[in-house]
Image (cartoon, helix red, strand yellow):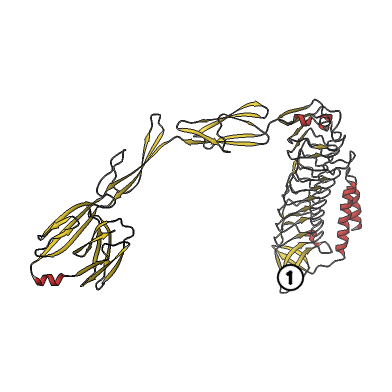
């Protein structure tokens, strides 16, 4: 192993400007391999035709390891690491992949790691030169030192959201790697993590990352643009040095202060021509674009000029044009502002804030924008036929409306239908038909008629119809010969059927039919006689109805002088007294009908 390490170290030390970082990686691999030579594996397990070696790490967990004689060098093709293995009757989970477990497995093409694995050891897959794809499960929280270093066939990597850190040399010299997705869970990117990934074309550092290590993306020669998230506070020496195609830098770090000096600054020897500064950036670190004479354009989205740390932050003199937000020229060109010193007479307003306008429905109307000045716009809402402008989404009703933009803004014009509407409430008596305003209905309910106005707009008439019922009451009454039946508008003494047409309380028709029987003998009188008494009568808040001789269930009804039935209830056979509540009745004369018998009641 000593001979192998010496050969590799000598070979890699020849790489330009990368000797010290990689010599450390080679030394780590050599130490890792030498330590494994002194180790033995606990057992082996064959899964899908691949034999792997394991060390027992607890009573129920194991780690994939490397057999001391290098047998894992013969693991080739596609390898699926099982989530559990059984040995001598005991089942173990696979929870980790040990240091150097697959180092120099040059014929290994893909690896599937189960969700049971929580850690992958240092240099675990280093020099797996045929490895094209790897599945990293969501259970892994960090990618260790040199894990995939020199995997020269690896084309793309998706790092799961569980990972919080990417270790040093993790993907260094992955020359076929063209894209990498760094999730928002990652907070740090280690030294040389992606160094010499010569196929990488663009990198976005998410807002979760706070530090980018030394040489992290050094000599990524195909890299054309870099976006740095807003939480980055430290960028290490030569982090993007010698990225010979890097022309565009999108810098969103709000408060990055940790640049080193002009000799080791992160963008050393990068031909940057365009820098875009995010709207929340508060400071530009020292030596940020030192000696970048290729710089031709800076776009600063920050309304308040970001502080510039020192006089060597930008090249001077230079011919770079700085474009800033509308309304910020006075702040950027103040005599004491470093921006004015670095870029005299080359700072221009022209970065208008984004303004988006729309209608709540394109068929209802449209919105047009007229530019008055850089950040002053006039909005005009034009409704379609049969619609009207109601307001803007913020409640403002001005139309046209002039706005001064101080940030990205959107407005929505709210248009409403100009439909004319009217509501009708009507009532008929039962059996009648409502035939007005285009309606022809006889049932209670809510009805709608749609019309069109002269200009073709909708007009709506809503009818709420109430149908009042017609009341019908039939009375079977008996009197003795020589007596007169009086009550409910009747005044008759002869047997027969009589009819009264009255009105109920709500104004509807009420028909009362009287079937009058006249007893002609004393026997008839005795058989149908009941005795009725009311006391007190006249009455105040209440009266007591006393009935004697009631042999069957009988209806009791209370009528006013117009014959309108006010109340109705029933007396059971044998009932002798009933208390009547009169508090809601006005003073007057009423008729109480019990079966065929009536009784006058006076309410005072």
**Is residue 11 in sight in this rendering?**
no
With respect to residue 502, does 99 lie above or below? Answer: below
**Is residue 295 in sight in this rendering?**
yes
In the rendered image, the quadrant that contains the N terminus is bottom right
Question: In front here: 445 or 325?
Answer: 445
- x, y (%) of residue 51? 74, 64
Question: In front here: 357 or 481?
Answer: 481
With respect to residue 109, does 40 lie above or below? Answer: below
- x, y (%) of residue 10? 91, 49
From the viewer's perspective, tell me whether residue 563 is left or right of residue 89.
left
From the viewer's perspective, tell me whether residue 574 is left or right of residue 477.
right
- Write the residue at 18% across / 55% down: 489
- Write the residue at 82% across / 53% down: 146
From the viewer's perspective, tell me whether residue 33 is left or right of residue 477.
right
- x, y (%) of residue 321? 78, 28
Q: How many marks?
A: 1
Circle 1 sits on which residue?
Answer: 60
In the rendered image, the quadrant that contains the C terminus is bottom left
From the viewer's perspective, tell me whether residue 36 is left or right of residue 329.
right
The quarter of the picture where residue 477 lies is: bottom left
């Amino acid at each position: 192993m000593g001979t192998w390490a010496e050969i590799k170290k000598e070979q890699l030390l020849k790489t330009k400007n990368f000797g010290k970082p990689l010599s450390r990686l080679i030394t780590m691999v050599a130490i890792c391999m030498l330590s494994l030579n002194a180790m033995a594996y606990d057992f082996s397990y064959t899964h899908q035709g691949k034999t792997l070696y394991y060390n027992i790490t607890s009573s129920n967990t194991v780690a994939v390891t490397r057999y001391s004689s290098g047998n894992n060098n013969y693991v080739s093709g596609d390898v699926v690491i099982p989530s559990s293995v059984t040995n001598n009757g005991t089942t173990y989970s696979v929870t980790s992949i040990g240091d150097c477990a697959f180092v120099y497995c040059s014929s290994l093409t893909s690896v599937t790691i189960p969700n049971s694995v929580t850690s992958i050891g240092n240099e675990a897959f280093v020099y797996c030169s045929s490895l094209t794809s790897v599945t990293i499960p969501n259970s892994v929280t960090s990618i260790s030192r040199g894990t995939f270093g020199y995997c020269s066939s690896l084309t793309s990597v998706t790092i799961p959201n569980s990972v919080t850190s990417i270790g040093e040399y993790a993907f260094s010299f992955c020359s076929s790697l063209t894209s990498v997705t760094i999730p928002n869970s990652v907070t740090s990117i280690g030294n040389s993590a992606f160094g010499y990934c010569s196929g990488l074309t663009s990198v976005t550092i998410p807002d979760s990352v706070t530090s980018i290590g030394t040489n992290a993306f050094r000599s990524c020669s195909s890299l054309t643009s870099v976006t740095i998230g807003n939480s980055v506070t430290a960028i290490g020496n030569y982090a993007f040095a010698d990225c010979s195609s890097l022309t565009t830098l999108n810098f969103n770090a709000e408060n990055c202060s940790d640049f080193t000096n002009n000799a080791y600054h992160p963008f050393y020897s990068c031909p940057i021509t365009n820098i875009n500064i995010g709207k929340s950036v508060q400071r530009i670190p020292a030596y940020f674009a030192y000696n970048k004479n290729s710089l031709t354009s800076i776009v600063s989205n920050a309304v308040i000029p970001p502080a510039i740390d020192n006089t060597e932050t930008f090249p001077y003199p230079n011919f770079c044009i700085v474009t800033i937000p509308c309304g910020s020229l006075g702040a950027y060109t103040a005599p004491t502002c470093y921006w004015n010193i670095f870029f005299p007479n080359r700072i221009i307003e022209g970065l208008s804030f984004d303004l988006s306008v729309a209608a709540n429905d394109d068929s209802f109307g449209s919105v047009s924008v007229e530019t008055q000045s850089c950040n002053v716009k006039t909005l005009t809402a034009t409704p379609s036929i049969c619609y009207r402008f109601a307001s803007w989404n913020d409640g403002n009703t001005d139309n046209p409306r002039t706005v001064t933009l101080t940030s990205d803004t959107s407005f929505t014009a709210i248009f409403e239908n100009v439909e004319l509407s009217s509501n009708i409430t009507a009532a008929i008596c039962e059996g009648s038909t409502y035939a007005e305003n285009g309606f022809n209905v006889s049932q209670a309910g809510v009805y709608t008629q749609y019309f069109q106005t002269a200009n073709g707009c909708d007009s709506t008439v809503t009818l709420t119809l109430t149908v009042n019922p017609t009341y019908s009451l039939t009375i079977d009454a008996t009197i003795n010969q020589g007596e007169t039946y009086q009550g409910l508008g009747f005044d008759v003494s002869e047997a027969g059927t009589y009819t009264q047409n009255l009105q109920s309380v709500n104004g509807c028709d009420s028909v009362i039919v009287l079937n009058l029987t006249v007893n002609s003998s004393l026997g008839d009188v005795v058989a149908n006689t009941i005795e009725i008494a009311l006391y007190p009568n006249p009455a105040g808040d209440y009266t007591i109805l006393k009935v004697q001789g009631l042999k069957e269930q009988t209806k009791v009804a209370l009528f006013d002088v117009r014959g309108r039935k006010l109340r109705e209830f029933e007396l059971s056979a044998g009932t002798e007294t009933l208390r009547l509540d009169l508090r809601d009745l006005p003073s007057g004369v009423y008729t109480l009908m019990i079966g065929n018998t009536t009784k006058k009641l006076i309410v005072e």
